[in-house]
Image (spheres, grey):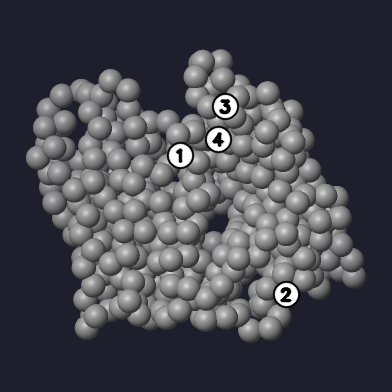
Amino acid sequence: MSTVIKTLGQNNETFAVKSGGHNPNQNFSSIDGGPLVSTAELNEVTLDKDAMTVRVGPGNRWEDVHKVLDGTNTTVIGGRIGNVGVGGYIVGGGLSFLSGEYGWAANNLVEAELVLANGTITTASASQNADLFKALKGGGANFGIVTTYTLKAHPIGDIWGGNLIFTASDETDKALLAALQNFTQNYPDEKAGIIMTSEITLTNLVHIWILFLFYDGPSPPAGVFDMFTDLNPGINNAKTRSYYDLLSYNNWAVLKGSAYTIATETTPLLAQNASADAVNTTLAHLEDCYAHWVNVSKSHAAVPGLVASLAFQPYPAVFARKAREVDAGGDLIAFDEAADRIIFEFDYSYFRGLPAVDRAVDAATVELYGGMKDVVDAAVADGRAPDVYRPLFMNDGYFRQDYWGRLDAGSRAFAEGVKESVDPRGFWGSRLAGGFFL
């Protein structure tokens, strides 16, 4: 990798770097007419049980990592779908089913070996190049190409997980949003995780809810997921299994062969003790967010093969506290405990063909995330949501979104200082085809 970067430094070619290739933003891990630097051969997965660490190459996908770890009673903090690539996931933060116990995936980084803009190979850890080490945790592709991640290993046995599937209706929609609010604001167990998704496809003929449930144990205690299972899903396939089995199973959600756009927004939730009707106020706000997604998505149903997906990803305040507990050095995302939050992920998959179709989906994506920000801003302005820090989650961001502009000012200034130190000429930002650049 060092030789590749030194060679590229001697010309003006725009290039891209590909890890697992999961990020759907055009040019983030792909390029038309320039060099594509693949990390596919950097696929090491080495468990050190004495040190409780795992060395992982960026060319892996998380299912590759967990396949090696399967049966060892150890795991690392990684993606919730096995198909997700290792590299970009970690430097973007990395939200996990295990984040309630261990924070972001980035908080569990012990050491990174990386190639800098001048081709130098260096190591970053809490004790060596500590500023660079922190900047990697939420800093994306601004500082170098990581060639090896050393991650904390954690004990794990059998887990419980799977899907609940519901047909959408006014009654079901409201009940699920209320259950999500309850789960997020009365977070029942740090071992519990959920992604609650709504899907619209086939020119609006199909509208369903798919929930991805997880519990770090053979079965969840009574009450952890009852607010969802009591709603009588049409399908409930959650069961006891290995973690590797669950993540591999979750790959069914990846529509291979389709083009994707992805975007995000963050909403804080009003504390339930803030007023007598705070619970109803927050539920109404979530309903407004959901209605905006439905309206925008249904208005673009004519796009060939369009599948619209909205993921509600709970980020209770305890997640932010856990991130700081497990990682004294901190990360750039720097969520606080001022509120429970929901991180939205918006996905449009479609059949790519004519440039006009790409333009239509781009416009729909911008309309969706821009309008969702307006919905949240309005709720904050009139007191229906608290006025707290609302960063964007890099892993779910659209290339047009202002990741750095939404980040804490201190984090951005810190990252700019590190960039000036390791890449004063701005090599990565000027030469990579895509990314969230300072």
Q: Residue at x 68, y 61 (%)?
A: 235
Quadrant, the C terminus: top left
* Marked residue nearer the N-terminal end (4 or 1): 1
Task: Please state which of residues 412 and 17 is positioned toward the viewer in this rendering.
Answer: 17
Asked if labels 2 and 1 touch by Cβ distance under 8 angstroms, the answer is: no
* Marked residue nearer the N-terminal end (3 or 2): 2
Spatial CA distance of label 3 from label 2 is 38 Å
Horizontal side of 222 relative to 250 (left or right) equals: right
Amino acid at dot 4: Ser
The quarter of the picture where residue 236 lies is: bottom right
Q: Which residue is mark 4?
A: 349
Spatial CA distance of label 4 from label 2 is 32 Å
Per the rendering, the mark at residue 226 is 2
Q: Which residue is mark 3?
A: 362
Amino acid at dot 1: Lys
* SS at badge 3: helix
Asked if labels 3 and 1 touch by Cβ distance under 8 angstroms, the answer is: no
Near mark 2 (Cα within 10 A), the count class, few <14, some 14-19 or many ≥20, is: few
* Marked residue nearer the N-terminal end (1 or 3): 1
Per the rendering, the mark at residue 256 is 1
